Image (spheres, rainbow, N blue to C red):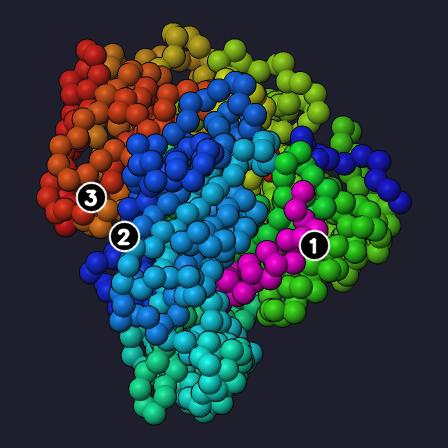
Amino acid sequence: MINLFLIKPLKGFWIIGLILFLGACTSSTIVQKESNSRKQSFNQNWDFYLSDLKDEDSISDQTQWKSLDLPHDWSIETAFDKQSPVGHGGGYLTGGLGWYKKDFTVDKQDSSKRISIHFDGVYCNSEVWINGHYLGKRPNGYIGFEYDITPYLNFGQTNQILVKVDNSNQPNSRWYSGSGIYRNVWLKKTEKLYVVNWGTFITTPKVSKDQATVNVVTTIGNDNNEEKTAVLRTRVLKDGQEITQSEKEFLISSKANQELEQQLEINTPELWSDVSPELYTAISEILIEGNLIDQKKTNFGIRNFRFDLDKGFILNGVQTKIKGVCLHHDLGPLGAAVNTRAIERKLEIMKEMGVNGIRTAHNPPSPELLDLCDQMGFIVMDEAFDMWAHAKNPHDYATVWEQWHKKDLEDQILRDRNHPSVFMWSIGNEIPEQWSPEGAEIGRELSAIVKGLDTTRVVTAGMNPPIHVNNDEVTIQFEDTAAEPNALAGSGALDLIGYNYAHQTYEDHQKNFPNTPFIASETTSGLQTRGFYEFPSDTTKIWPVRWDLVFTQGNEDNTVSAFDQVRTPWGSLHEETWKIIKKHDFLSGMFVWTGFDYIGEPTPYQWPSRSSYFGIVDLAGFPKDVYYMYQSEWTDTPVLHVFPHWNWEEDTLVDLWVYYNNADEVELFLNGESLGVKSKEGDDLHLMWRVPYEKGTLKAVSRKDGKVVLEREVKTAGIASELSLTADRSTIYADGEDLSFITVGVMDENGVIVPRAADQISFTIDGPGKIVGVANGDPTNHESFKGQTHKAFNGKCLVVLQAGREKGNMVLTATAPGLKQSTINIQIK
Ligand code: GAL
C-alpha cells in the first residue's frame, strides 16, 4: 500500500592523533591531533579570494587575496539577507564561489618520498590543482579526500596549491552548511612503502571479560618501481604501555596495494563503554631489515553490543538506554569552521545533561567529533545522506547522486570504521523514496556497500516514519507496510528500524516489525526561545499547525515559550516521547531533535528568524530550561531547577515549574511563606505551582526522607547596573586554536541576573589573542557573529576568545552604556 498520510512528508525541499609532538599541538584538554612528520597540519598561511578568478593573472595579483589560516568558513562572515538564495534553511547567510591558494616548499631531501594532501572536508564542489596540474573534483561537502601530489612537486622549490570551492548553486541544503575549506587540511609524507589512507581496519570478533581477540587488517601500498619484502609489525598499547604485538613478513609487487591480516589476543581487556570509554592504540609499523619505514597509529576500543528485539541496546552485556541527541555540525558563532575545543565544549554540555548518544545529522561528521566521542563515551549514529536520487532542494546532492554515492559512502565507512563510538550506520534521513520500490532497491544497494566494508555494526535509516500515521487526527493505520518489501522499512536493507517521530506508534513496534529491533532515530522537535515564557504553561501549542501551511499564529517578536509546551505537528513535547522510551526495554533509545540550536531552519518562523528553536541548548551554548528535565532523568546529579525568572507585573498569574530528582518532594516558598509541598505522581516529570506574582524571593527546597537535598532561590532583579564575565576556562594553550568561552551576564546591583536585559555590549581585547565569535541565543538577531559588539539576550551574551601562538595574558573588557564595565584575564600558556 502506498501511504496516504505522512506525519511529516518532505519539507521543502580517529586516535587520538599521534601524539609524537605533544607540546606543540594541544588544542584542548582532551584531544591531540595527529601531527608528526607523517601527517602535518597544512592549515596555515593560505590566501583566499571570494569570487571567481577572471584569468590566470588574477592568481598572481596578490591585491585580490586575503591571507588566512584554515579551517575557514566564509559564509559565517556574510550578512543576514532576506533575499539570500540559501533561504531560511541556510539561515539567510550567503554561499558563493571562492578560491584558496597556498605556496609551500617540500625539502629536497624528501624527494624520494610519497607526498599527499588530505582534506577533511570542503563545502562544496571542491576542485584542486597543484602547480597547474588538475587533481580532481569532490562535490560532497562532508567527506574527506586525498590526492597523491608526488609526481607534480618541485622538491626544494616553491609549489602552489589552488582550490576552487563552489557553493554558489543555492539552495543545496536544508540547514546551514558553511562554505569553504572548513575542516582541517594535512600534508602527508611517507616512504613509498606505506600504510594507505584509512588503511587499517580493527575489529574485535571475540570479546569477554577475560580475553579479547583483536583482528587487524592493514592495507599497504607500494609505489616503488620494484617489489619489496618487508615486515608488518602491529603493536597494541594501553595507556602508552605495549601489551602485545604481532609480526608478519610480506612480499608486495611494485605499484600494488596489499591487505595483511593479523590477530592479537588481549587478556582481561578494559572494555569501551559510554560510561568508561577505554581506548587502545594499534601502531602499524613497516620494517625492512629492521629499519622502520612507516608508522601509523589507530585508536580502537574493545566492546560488544547487540540490539535485542526485547531488551533494546545491550553494550558489553549491560542493557543501556540510548539517550541521544541529533546535532548539526555548525559551531554557532564560529560557523562550520572546525575547532576541536568548540566541538568538545558542545559535547561536554551534552554529557553534563546525561546525553550518551549523538546522531550526526545528516552527514559524515568531522574526524574530530568522532575522536571526541571515542574519548568521552558517546554512542554514535554516523549518518551518510539527507537525500538519495530524489532532491529535497533544487541543487542538493541528488544532482550528483548517481555518480558519487558509492564512492562517498565507501569513504565514510573506510574513514570511520575504527571508531569505537560508532555503532550504527545511517544510510539516510527521511529519504523521499523511502516508500517506494526504488527506495527499497537503493536501500539494499547502500546496505550492501556498508556490509562490504563493515559487518560489525548495524545499518539503519531515519524514516519519517517507517509505518503510516495519519497526520492530523494522529490516527494510526497499521497497514502491512511493516513487512512491505517495496518500501525501505520492509526491504531487508535495515538491521534496525529507525523512527523519525511517530512516538504514537512506538509501543506497537514489536507487532509491526517483529523481526527487527527499534531505534528512535529522531524525536521531539519541541520549540523554545531561551528565557521567554508564556502563561498558561499547561496548554500545548502546535506550531506550525501543519508542516505545509504558512505559520501565522506566532508572536510578533518571533519568540516561543520556553515551557515544554510548544511542538511541531510532526513532533512531540520533550516529556511525551521520553516517557514512552523510558517505559519499555525494547525501545533501545532516542535521538532528540536537537541537542543544540543550529543556524538555519528557524521553524516555526521565517525571516527575521535565522536559526533554530529546536535546541535543548541555544546557539550560544546556554541551556534552555528543559535541559534540566533531561538532566534530572538522565543523570544521578542532584537536580532542582525552578523557572521562570521572577520579574513580572504585580498580580500576574505565574506558572512555576520545577524539575528535580533524588528527592521525594519539593516545597516552594514565596517571601518566606510556604506555597505547599508537591511530589511528582505517576510518570510526571515536573511539578507546577500557579502563583499570583509578588516581587521578592522564591525559594525551592527538595527533600528526601525529610532531609534537605537541595535549595534554590530565584530573586526579583532590580535595574541593570553591571556586567559580569565568567570563563569556561581561564587558562588556554598558545597554539593559535584554543578557545575560552566567556559568558556575559547583565546584573543588578545585588548580582542578580536581569532576565529580559537586552543591553548593547561592546568588547575590547588586550594581549595575544582575539575575539572569534559573539552570540546571544536569539534566533532573530542579525548582528554579525564576528563583531566586537553584541546585544544581550534575556540577560546573557557569549564571547569566544581564541589564543594566538604567543604566551601571556589576554584581558577582555566588556562595556555597555549606563552599566559598570567588567574585565576578565585569560592566561595563555
Ligand atoms: C526532521 C528532519 C530534520 C529537521 C527536523 C525539524 O524531519 O529530519 O532534518 O528538519 O525534521 O523538525
Q: CA distance from mark 1 to mark 3?
A: 47 Å
- Could you say where residue 290 lies in the image, as x and y percent from the top left? 32, 90
Residue tagged by mark 1?
A: 497
Q: Is residue 664 magenta?
A: no
Which residue sits at x=52%, y=43%? 124
> Mark 1 or mark 3: which comes first in sequence?
1
Left or right relative to 659: residue 822? left
- Could you say where residue 71 lies in the image, as x and y percent from the top left? 37, 45
Q: Amino acid at mark 2?
A: Ser
**Total count of labels:** 3
Q: CA distance from mark 2 to mark 3?
A: 11 Å
Q: CA distance from mark 1 to mark 2?
A: 39 Å
User: Contact, CB < 8 Å: mark 1 with mark 3?
Assistant: no
Element marked by disc 1: strand
Residue tagged by mark 2?
A: 27
- Could you say where residue 426 lies in the image, as x and y percent from the top left? 62, 54
When the figure is inspected, residue 178 is found, relative to residue 715, above or below; the finding is below
Which residue sits at x=22%, y=16%? 816
**Nearest to the observer: residue 311 or residue 620:** 620
**Nearest to the observer: residue 304 or residue 664:** 304
When the figure is inspected, residue 653 is found, relative to residue 529, above or below; the finding is above
Query: Can residue 115 be seen here?
Result: yes
> Mark 1 or mark 2: which comes first in sequence?
2
Question: On residue 153, which mark appears?
Answer: none
Would you say the magenta stretch is mainly helix, strand or loop?
helix
Element marked by disc 2: loop
Identify the magenta region: 399-422
Query: Can residue 34 be seen here?
Result: no
